[in-house]
Image (tube, rainbow, N blue to C red):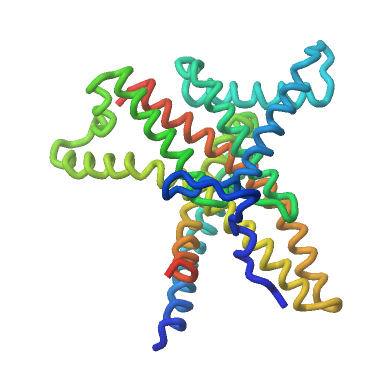
Amino acid sequence: MATNPMHQFNVYRIGPEIKLGNLDISFTNASLFMVISSLTILILFFIGTRKKSIIPTKVQLLAELSFTFISKMINDTAGSKAKPYFAFIFSLFMFVLFCNMLGMIPYSFTVTSHIIVTFILASFIFVGVTIIGFVKHGLSYLKLFVPSGVPIILLPLIVVIEIISYLSRPISLSVRLFANMMAGHTMLKVFGGFVISLGLIGGWLPLSFSVALTGLEILVAFLQAYVFAILTCIYLNDALNLHH
Amino acid sequence: MELEAAKMIGAGLAAIALAGAGVGIGIIFGNYLSGAMRNPSAAQKQFPNLLLGFALAEATGLFGLVIALIILFAF
């Protein structure tokens, strides 16, 4: 009776097939949900910032809260030098958050549960941060790989480890978000399958469990967006304030 | 042993990684709680660090889960 829990991650075409050479760039359900989440963010901030009253409405409060939340986070983790990158980190956080949250609606599609989406976001950040580091500090940015206070004998080993850990940043950043989303949604569907297969008598237990899991998943959806943004800030902090 | 059976066993073994994530999350929350009990005024400021540590610890376990799913579905 239980269907495949991986079925929810299927990407299928909506509308006509568009080909660019060998590349299939047709409009899929993944692109549809990306468009929906971007539009939701735009509408939220359009309505929220339209009136700008001193006593805020609910939507305006939401917009202001998220704005100050991210601005405070950037200030705490990356310092005042990171102010110019606020727009990028804020839109990154909102996009990931809304993709995660819209994925929690039953029968919708979670964009961030696909590794290619998160990997593109993470490699964008990685390349951008590396460029910023080299532009700001020139070749002395390479000092990032040489921590101070390490004995000379250990240095060859430490430098190799630091370089590997630096290069694995986009992988760990993307796999973290992708794995959390995919594991959570698979778990929800597996428990949903238990409800059906246990029937009217035994199905109540997995049903209540999956209600609790939904709550946990909403927390994880927020937390992962937050972690994605805060790790971007930490990487940016390494590039901007070189203090090794 | 058949390939199908070996895959199942391998996937099960890879999921053991989640035990480590459980231990890590327990340590993080436990230590946060004991620290917060000793000095409640400093607790609020460390809350973002708590969430960060939680997410980092959970992710390492989920890497193991990803390996399990790769074994099951990608090969």
Q: Is residue B42 left or right of residue A239?
A: right
- Place of residue A128 in the rendered image (x, y in percent of width and height, measured from the top left): 40, 29
Q: Is residue B21 left or right of residue A239?
A: right
Q: Nearer the viewer, residue A163 or B56?
A: A163
Residue B30 in sight: no
The quadrant of the picture occupied by the C terminus of chain A is top left
* Residue at 53 percent of width and 38 percent of height: A228
The residue most toward the left is A153
Residue A65 in sight: yes
* Residue at 70 percent of width and 51 percent of height: A108
Q: Nearer the viewer, residue A238 or A152?
A: A238
- Place of residue B74 in the rendered image (x, y in percent of width and height, measured from the top left): 45, 66
- Place of residue B3 in the rendered image (x, y in percent of width and height, measured from the top left): 41, 82
Above or below, A173 relative to A196: above
Above or below, B57 relative to B51: below
- Place of residue A123 in the rendered image (x, y in percent of width and height, measured from the top left): 41, 38
Q: Is residue A78 left or right of residue A187?
A: left
**Tally of marks:** 0
Q: Nearer the viewer, residue A3 or A66?
A: A3
* Residue at 39 percent of width and 35 percent of height: A126
The quadrant of the picture occupied by the N terminus of chain A is bottom right
Rendering quarter of residue B22 = bottom right
* Residue at 53 percent of width and 25 percent of height: A88
Rendering quarter of residue B2 = bottom left
Q: Is residue A11 left or right of residue A214?
A: left
